[in-house]
Amino acid sequence: MGRLSLYAFHLFLISLILHFFGLIKLFFEPLLFNELFFYGLILDFIFLSALIIDLAVPTVFFPSKKPFKFKPINNLQISIGMTAYNDEKAIGNSVKQFKELKEVVSVTVIDNNCIDNTASEAVKNGAKVTKEPVQGYGAACMRALKEARKTGNLICLVEGDMTFSASDLKKLTAYIENTDMVLGTRTTAEIIDSDSQVTWFMRYGNLFIAKLLQLRFWDKVRLTDVGCTFRIIRPEALDKIIDKLHVTGHYFSPHMILVALENDLKVIEVPVTLKKRVGESKGVGDDALKGLITGSKMWWMILMH
Ligand SMILES: Nc1nc2c(ncn2[C@@H]2O[C@H](COP(=O)(O)OP(=O)(O)OP(=O)(O)O)[C@@H](O)[C@H]2O)c(=O)[nH]1
Ligand SMILES: [Mg+2]
């Protein structure tokens, strides 16, 4: 379920192009029959039919009867896995802000072949440091999840670049009693810094890819962001998916969401704040071109998965 409307949506995108050129043609040749418009309408019709079959029929005729989950975690013990790649300017305060929370039992910084003082700054501020030799954001995230799994009763993945705030952890934990994984979303303009990396292009880009992913799992989730590292997951839920995660590059984040949904984990998003990055961005940051490339890879992955 979901695949049909996801693929049909691409026909709708083609129809938009046909309508556009149809309009141009209409301007120069005001004929009664415009074949570009006509073919566009056929594609629209296919898309709408796919949507109805895929989304409406199961919801109306076969509504899910699964009982609502309510599994509070008593005595929260959160284990933090923090990614770092030459982040000596930010890592100290990133560790400190999480260490100050009483629910946090450990902070493990993943040193992804850093050549600066990231490791010593992290240790100085009370973190454990583990080296991940495979280069890449995804490789660092997977290692962070595995390391954080070793202690506590809740796992948190976050970047050590001061973009995220430890005080937002309570927003994420508020929903964990009903779900298996809580994702942050950075597309809530009201609570992100105006000089953060999420520009309007990044916001709408993330929103677009998130909606593509949502089309695939329409009855399971509502998504508005695909690149937010800040997330929490129950240990038993992570055990179900950890061996199925394999993306080492920048598009790890939607890959993990996809695998979680495919394995029937209950996933919810909550808005988190976002601040300007401390230190140099090595990922997408606010670079529109890098965003476009990473977004295209995410798009392809969602289609091919
Ligand atoms: N880009 C990148 N980041 C890595 C790598 N290894 C670990 N990281 C960490 O992964 C996080 C993401 O990298 P950032 O430089 O913050 O990228 P970003 O500006 O947040 O861009 P986004 O991809 O949009 O999140 C940071 O905590 C990095 O330190 C790596 O090989 N490449
Ligand atoms: Mg970052």
Image (cartoon, rainbow, N blue to C red):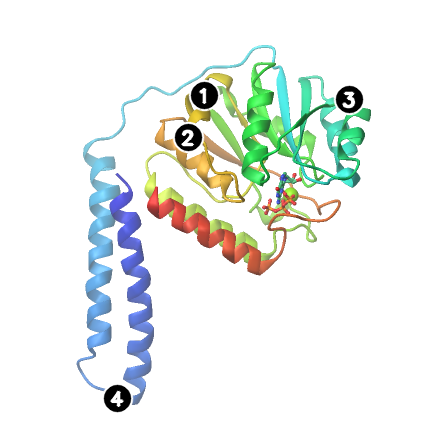
**At 33% from the left edge and 42% from the top edge, which residue is drawn?**
216
Residue tagged 4? 29
Q: Are marks 4 and 2 in contact (CB under 8 Å)?
A: no
Q: Amino acid at mark 1?
A: Ala
**At 20% from the left edge and 56% from the top edge, which residue is drawn?**
46
Q: CA distance from mark 3 to mark 1?
A: 28 Å
Q: Earlier in the sequence, mark 4 or mark 2?
A: 4
**At 18% from the left edge and 34% from the top edge, which residue is drawn?**
61
Q: Is residue 75 above or below residue 165?
A: above
Q: CA distance from mark 3 to mark 4?
A: 72 Å
Viewer-nearest residue: 261 or 293:
293
- Ligand 2's image quarter is top right
Quarter of the image for the N terminus: give it.
Answer: top left
Q: Are marks 1 and 4 in contact (CB under 8 Å)?
A: no
Q: Earlier in the sequence, mark 2 or mark 1?
A: 1
Q: Amino acid at mark 3?
A: Gly
Q: CA distance from mark 1 to mark 4?
A: 60 Å
